[in-house]
Amino acid sequence: MSKIQALGLDVGSTTVKMVGLDAEGEMAWHFLEQAEPLLENQIARFLERARNVTGPLDGIPLVATGYGRGLVNQATRTVTEITCHARGIYRELGHGGTLVDIGGQDSKVIGISPQGKVIDFTMNDKCAAGTGRFLENTASRLKVSLDRMGPEALSVSDEVSISSTCTVFAESEVISLIAHGVSIASILRGLHRSLVKRMVSMILTVGLTPPLMLSGGVAQNPAIRQMLEEETGQKIILPHYPQLMGACGAALFALDA
Amino acid sequence: MSIGPALRYHWNVNLLGRAGLRWVRWQAERRVKRGAHGKSHILTPPLKISARTKELIGRHYLKGRYANLRGKVAWVTSGAPIEFLKALDFYLLYPENHGAVCGTTRTAVDICAQAENAGYSRDICSYARTDLGTMLSCQTPVGKLPKPDLLLTCTNICQTVLHWYRVLAHHFDVPLILIDTPFVYTETTDHSVAYVKRQLEEAIPIAEEVAGQSLDERKLKEVTRLSKLASELWLELLGRCRHRPAPISVFDQFIQMAPIVEMRGDNFTVDFYAAMLKEVDERIAQVIGAVKNERKRLLWDNLPVWYRLRYLAEFLGRHGVVIAASTYTNAWAELTPKMDPERPLESMARTYMYPILNRGTGDKLATMRQMIDDYRLDGVILHSDRSCKPYSVGQMDQRDRLIRDFGVPALLLEADHNDSRSFSKEQVANRLDAFIEMLEV
Amino acid sequence: MTIPAIPRRIDVIRTFKEQGGYVAAVLPIHYPRSLLRAFNILPVEVWGPPGIKARDGAKHLQPYVCSIVHNALSFLQSGGLDITDILIVPHTCDSLQGLGSILLDFVSPKQPVIPIYLPRGKRESDVDFFANELRSIYRQLEAITGHSPTDADLLQSIYREEAADKLLSELHRCRRNLPFSNLAFYRLLRNREHLPAETFMELAQKALAQKVDTTQDGGIPILLSGIVPEPMSLLGAISQMGGVVAADDLACCGRRLYPPGQSDDPFRRIAERILYAPPDPTRGNSIKERLEHLLQLVETSGAKGVIFYEVKFCEPELFDLPQLRQGLQEAGLPSLTIEMDLNDPLSHQALTRLEAFLEMIQ
């Protein structure tokens, strides 16, 4: 393995990600875990792992991003996940466009210039309607595991319309649909559609400049990908590691130092 | 108007469109006669005249579709003093009514999304979002809306319309007339009336310039007279619901009110309500109620829930509950006595300052109280409308007083007049069930 | 360097009352200060206040009414305004209209409630109406206090407020040449909301004496727009992230730089001052006027971006945003919108947006 020259740590609300880059800015190492309540301990463990791979961390710059970035005392500097995602994806794909990142707690749409700069961005408002949490909550109601949700939704063609975008209202709507004997799969399809519509609305607020790129954990959900393509009429481009774009960007900033 | 556009207008509206609409009406009338609306055990079928209502509304939007070919167009608020514009031969478009059409046809949410995608917050009024959505995307269930040459906004219903029309003015780059009507906290002051009158006087030259003609005093008096006549008939019509059983419910009124809002000042509107009154009187003579088994009578406060009219009518009707009156439909009737065709401007200033939405919350309670007595009502549903703050703020105290001071059961129902995403069917059903149990039907 | 010592709000109120004056609690935004002072009434503004238990207001107001109105009512109900003698409720928006009305009709607080209708234009008819409205307020205050100030008394009071507003404008103009942080400067400005004009002027002069020739901060200059920047930690956060508020279009600050009046009639003069102030949607200014004003602020301050910091549910603000943002974008200025609730701490997400925005315009 080539020598790690810079580290990026993305402390998200559902997962924590770390990326190590070599001198050319290529990803040399990465690591991902579910986020734990005691983030400080988890961060220490991440750094320990990095040390096992790279040897002593002294002198290797570390940039932290994500909602827990302020907790990383070891960081040389912190940069927001907006800027990091744009940087990470631009490095990998080499072009601008519109990046959609659906995270557990926050979703964002970022307009990226042909030179890789953030031109505009938006985030979901306070409620969980436009986030991964919206699916998670209802998934647990329906007793479907997260990774099965997308395929289940795509397994049927009929789709119920979920009118509520509010998570609380949607939950009561789902309960009543179950009571009326609607199949779980078509409810799931409806839920995905609702989330995607919400995302499309955010995309249009920023303005859709093709190509459309997708990152974040939800990018692994095939139903989201398919419906996002249907609703926008745009082919979606996925980076190799959708979940690592923030950490990559952070590491690239570290490499600048 | 040059010949080409005039011919196109005539061809599309008077020849093709009118015939088409007449055909649709004829079919609708046959359906009513055949009893195609189903033999409901709950609700009496709609009035026969409903077919004509549809035709009138259809014709209004058909004319609108080609109105830019024929002459000048003004977009106006539902409470605005429109008589002088009518006398100047403007085609009047009421974005709020258009919003209601989108609401009843369940197209409002998609159209709202167009506005939301452009950055308009979901916390602003859903009528405004519907209208701005149409403004931005031209999406509408009525075919096409004409572009305005003039905008008229009157703050007697809310401040929302001021902000909304500022957005329209910026987008269309046309003159905006503002009639600012100071809110009546307790009583009207002379300086407020003078202020409104002066604004009306100053509005006329602006409108004349856009219209390219001068206001004819006789025409203004005539329009005001027709406006008053239609309002008088509407007032009488609503009054008929004092009968037991109520011949029509507010759900009928919500649909039948379109002409009094967007076609006042026209003679056919007068004929229409005269005919409707006749049909309603026939119902009364035959003791036919809107709800077949009327047991309890309620008052509705605030705007309708446009996308759930039938659901609510049937839900309540199933329990023998009719909503016989509403402060909302009453708003286009209660001011009739204030109108004076001989003194159009003075009387307009007073009339238009005094709709229920421009009066204090205590005054609204008094109006409700009066209606409960007049119509012998057993309870009140207050629709807490997320989109309409001037109508909704005060309802919590009004409800409290109705229950505590007057012993009238009252329910606060959370919803939104045009945005079905703020309507939770399960919650509403639950609350209505509990309320009906409380009424001991 | 530090900000001059600021007397505490409660002490100001007590002192004023001990000297025989009255105190009026005033809700946002525009109202006739000089008229009140001519009656020996000290206006003390109530913008919420933030961070209180908003429980009492929830009995009267639906959850979709903004937190400023909720908090004001809760504060009143919990006794927070007991020390005041009069409540003034300007007709700023539909929600404040509703609050004024339920105070009069249902809540009936111990203090007399005086609503003020604010016309939504600046035509001759608006000025005339507003002057008459102020005359009617005069009669109400006369009935409450038993005083009948003469025209000369009124004019004297107006001139004093005009002098104070002149200093306030001066502070705004040279804000970047004063050695104060975003937060300290903002606190200084907002003393205008409860200090008597003469006390405020002393404070302002002391602050202006510290003016230096060079710009004091090297931060990224931004223009802050909105109603009120609460929680105030927002300003600290902006500093921390390397930003500096170079100009503001806040309803509580920059939109209240009232110009001097022209007329010799005191009522007309007050009306002119309020109606000719910088554009404000609650006074019905057009989007064009607002956009021009923002662009002018950007030009004079060198701001590199605009932050619209809005109170949730505030229709007057929300309606204008898309067209304002579009206009700014066409002029090459990025902007950001953040919505907040007066009772919530600044959310992590809001902070991230703010930081990302500063990273973007850097």
Image (cartoon, rainbow, N blue to C red):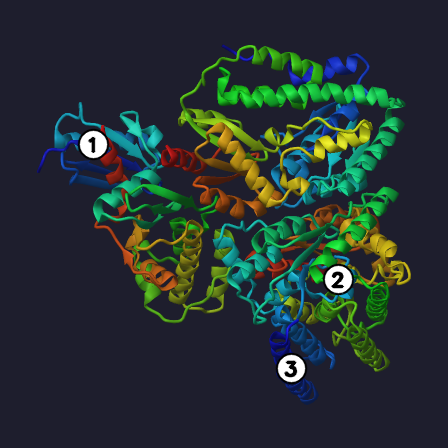
Q: Are marks 2 and 3 on the same chain?
A: yes
Residue assigned mark 1: A255
Which image quadrant for residue B28? bottom right
Residue B350 appears in the figure: yes
Q: Are marks 1 and 3 on the same chain?
A: no
At mark 2, the secondary structure is: helix
Q: Nearer the viewer, residue B134 or C16?
A: B134
Q: Are marks 2 and 3 in contact (CB under 8 Å)?
A: no
Please name the residue shown 81% across and 27% down the image. C266
Q: Chain of mark 3?
A: B
Front label number (1 vs 2):
2
Q: Which residue is mark 3?
A: B21
Residue type highlighted by circle 3: Leu
- What number is the disc on residue A10? none
Mark 1 or 3: the one toward you: 3
Q: Position of residue B102 (x, y in %)?
A: 59, 66
Q: Nearer the viewer, residue B49 or C153?
A: C153
Question: How packed is label 2: few (under 14 Cα within 10 Å), some, or many (20 or more)?
Answer: many
Quadrant of the drawing holding the C terminus of chain C: top left
Q: Position of residue A17 (x, y in %)?
A: 26, 39
Q: Chain of mark 1?
A: A
Please state the horizontal and vertical placement of residue B329, each as a whole percent of the image.
76, 63
Q: Secondary structure at mark 3?
A: helix
Tell me if residue C77 can be seen: no
Three-letter amino acid code at disc 1?
Leu
Query: Do dots 1 and 2 share one subunit?
Result: no
The residue that mark 2 highlights is: B85
Residue at 31 percent across and 48 percent down: it is A216
Q: Is the residue under label 3 in contact with that under label 1 (CB below 8 Å)? A: no
Q: Is residue C250 left or right of residue C105?
A: left
Q: Pointer 3: residues within 10 angstroms few (<14), some, or many (20+)?
A: some
Q: Is residue B344 left or right of residue B168?
A: right
